[in-house]
Image (spheres, helix red, strand yellow):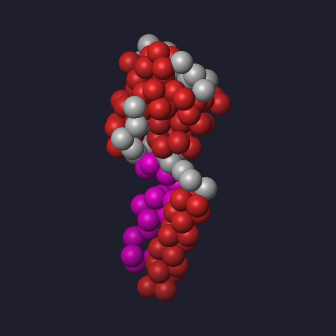
Amino acid sequence: MLEHRLEELRTEKKLTKKEVAAFLKINQSTYGKYELGKREPDYDTLTKLAELFCVSTDYLLGRTDIKNPTESIAAHHDGDEWTEEELEDIEQFKDFVRMRREKRGE
């Protein structure tokens, strides 16, 4: 699962394997092996990949289909349990988190 997610996310971000490897400070061939499923990243590298692609490590590992924790806020509510005002607060919080991520350059 990891290899498929890495290739998908890299393609979505329009990055080359060389660019991802440079970000991780590893050889391009090492990163290429991650996408081929011939090698697995260590914990620190997995964390850096999650940061680069703005997803959770659980998403990378295939433990969830929710790319990042802020998406889980929207995914776990049904309109019956929340007032309109609370739903608006949730949306504003999601916008805040996205803005903060962009400000950090992720």
Residue at screen point 49% across, 51% down: 68
Magenta span of residues? 66-81
Residue at screen point 47% across, 32% down: 19
Q: Residue 11 at what x, y percent from top left?
A: 34, 38
Residue 68 painted magenta: yes
- 32 or 44, which is in the foreground? 32
| Residue 2 in view here | no
- 24 or 35, which is in the foreground? 24
Q: Residue 70 at what x, y percent from top left?
A: 51, 59
Residue 60 painted magenta: no
Q: Is residue 60 above or below residue 37?
A: below
Q: Is residue 24 above or below residue 52?
A: above
Residue at screen point 61% across, 56% down: 104
Image side of residue 48 versus residue 91, left or right: right
Q: Residue 86 at what x, y percent from top left?
A: 51, 81
| Residue 64 in view here | yes
